[in-house]
Image (cartoon, rainbow, N blue to C red):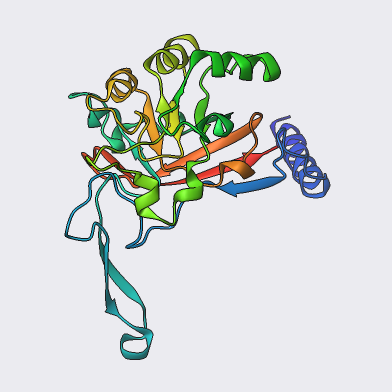
Amino acid sequence: MRSRTLIIGYALVLALFLFAKHAPLSAPHTEFRDMIDLTHPLNAKTPVFDESPTPAFEAKTIATIAKDKYFAREIRLPEHFGTHIDAPAHFAAGLWTVDQIPPKRLVGPLVVLDVHAKTLHNPDYLISVEDIARWEQTNGSIPLGSIVIARTGWESRWNSPKEYRNADANGVMHFPGFSLEAAKFLVEGREIRGLGIDTLSLDYGPSQDFPVHEFVLGHSVYQLENVANLEEAPIKGGLLVVAPMKLEGGSGSPVRLLALER
């Protein structure tokens, strides 16, 4: 009887194996038709928030294929450089450093708020709750756990650090940002995972006390700054993958942003 049971068991295993081998693979539940890179390349011409006589980015070649049979460089750059992430610890002591952000929070539905028409004649434009309401009237409520990024059109100035910083005669920068009210609504009302923008800062250029940074990061929501190619990204329905360097104890890091379009 035991031998018969073993034979039947082996037969079932063999049948399952053969079925699995010849059965067509089922299509994934979610398919993506395109991938958009929302990241600026890093180089010595990358605009920076604080200007300095010393270049923020340096790359030194330490090996060449001709001489060493391999190519390698040594680089030096700030944590908050180019397209980058601000970890909560950047403004809130004791909260997550960049390496401590849970991986599941680095992937989420992408929402693009397009306000570039509002900034054409007002470089100090503050993204408002009304802008968010208009987006939701057209597209439905922002899904909980989304990563929301504002497209202000400021990327058009990227190749000119002077125009991108847009500092006046007193050294005060002028570029768009989020109002504190809009940031609070997204963090508290829509429970977003991340908040981003295509400028140097979520707080607008003239800000001296950075209230948006303090509130957003203080609620363990990370920030994404200097985001690229938002005109190519889906305004809704996409998925964003946020891939920072895992710098132990880091307040932030350059990041690769990939938008997956369904």
Q: Is residue 57 left or right of residue 19?
A: left
Q: Is residue 131 above or below residue 222?
A: above
Q: Nearer the viewer, residue 224 or 205?
A: 205
Q: Nearer the viewer, residue 25 or 129?
A: 129
Q: Is residue 41 left or right of residue 96?
A: right
Dividing the picture into quadrants, the one containing residue 169 is: top left
Q: Is residue 13 above or below residue 144?
A: below
Observer able to see residue 26? yes
Image quarter in which the C terminus is found = top right
Q: Measuring 46% from the left and 49% from the top, which residue is drawn there?
A: 157
Image quarter in which the N terminus is found = top right
Q: Is residue 127 left or right of residue 211?
A: right
Q: Residue 112: x percent and y percent?
A: 57, 31
Q: Measuring 24% from the left and 50% from the top, which residue is drawn there?
A: 78
Q: Is residue 4 above or below residue 59?
A: above
Q: Residue 39: x percent and y percent?
A: 48, 49
Q: Residue 18: x percent and y percent?
A: 79, 47
Dividing the picture into quadrants, the one containing residue 53 is: bottom left
Q: Measuring 69% from the left and 41% from the top, which residue is drawn there?
A: 32
- Number of marks drawn: 0
